Image (spheres, rainbow, N blue to C red):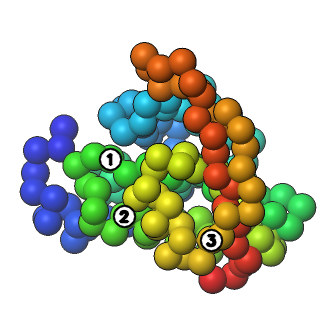
Amino acid sequence: MFGTSNTQSALNVFVRVMRASDLDLVVASENLSLQNPWSKRVFSDCLRSGYECWVLATRDRIVAHGVLSVGAGEAHVLTICVHPDFRRMGYGRRMLKHLLDKGAKNAAKVCFLEVRPSNKLAIALYLSFGFVQVGERRHYYPANPGEQVREDALILSRLLPL
């Protein structure tokens, strides 16, 4: 499914609205990437609820995806995921910028997100965009398989627009 060169794919990546027909590929990427991935039903609910659901794609593959909710002057990044074959190529940065732009265009004045303290690469990305820690949610994330302890979440925030 991801057999061609990453360099070639990088040249033809575009952002578009997530479609119901994308969900099998989106969920497959989640399953490869995350210890506690979202289900197809969760993504379907996000699409049905009118959330900002986006993908970075080539003609035949999903490189990254992200979901943003916006309401009452606030945006909330719910998820960003880059397929493992396309990491460290700037696609997470590109998706985050797109979601923040969408939040600002929808009249959000501030954006929030939660992140696992163990996800150092994501934290570095968010800090590079000007997010700061504004709180913590104790035992927010489900325990990873084989572990008993739920992981906390760092709550990060930044003003919009960029």
Are circles 1 and 3 on residues that touch, CB within 8 Å? no
Mark 2 burial class by Cα count in 10 Å: few <14, some 14-19, many 20+ = many
Tell me, for residue 131, which label it has, or none: 3
Residue receiving disc 1: 83
Image location of residue 115, percent across then percent down: 58, 50
Image location of residue 77, percent across then percent down: 64, 56
Residue 107 picture quarter: bottom right
- Between circles 3 and 2, the one closer to the viewer is 3
Q: Give the CA separation, mark 1 to mark 3.
A: 23 Å
Would residue 130 be visible to someone looking at this image?
Answer: yes
Residue 146 picture quarter: top left
Q: Give the CA separation, mark 1 to mark 2.
A: 9 Å
Quarter occupied by the C terminus: bottom right
Residue receiving disc 2: 91
Quarter occupied by the N terminus: top left
Are circles 3 and 2 on residues that touch, CB within 8 Å? no
Image location of residue 137, percent across then percent down: 73, 43
Q: Is residue 47 left or right of residue 123?
A: right
- Mark 3 is on which residue type? Phe
Considering only vertical position in the picture, is 149 above or below 82? above
Considering only vertical position in the picture, is 160 above or below 38? below
Mark with earlier residue (1, 2): 1
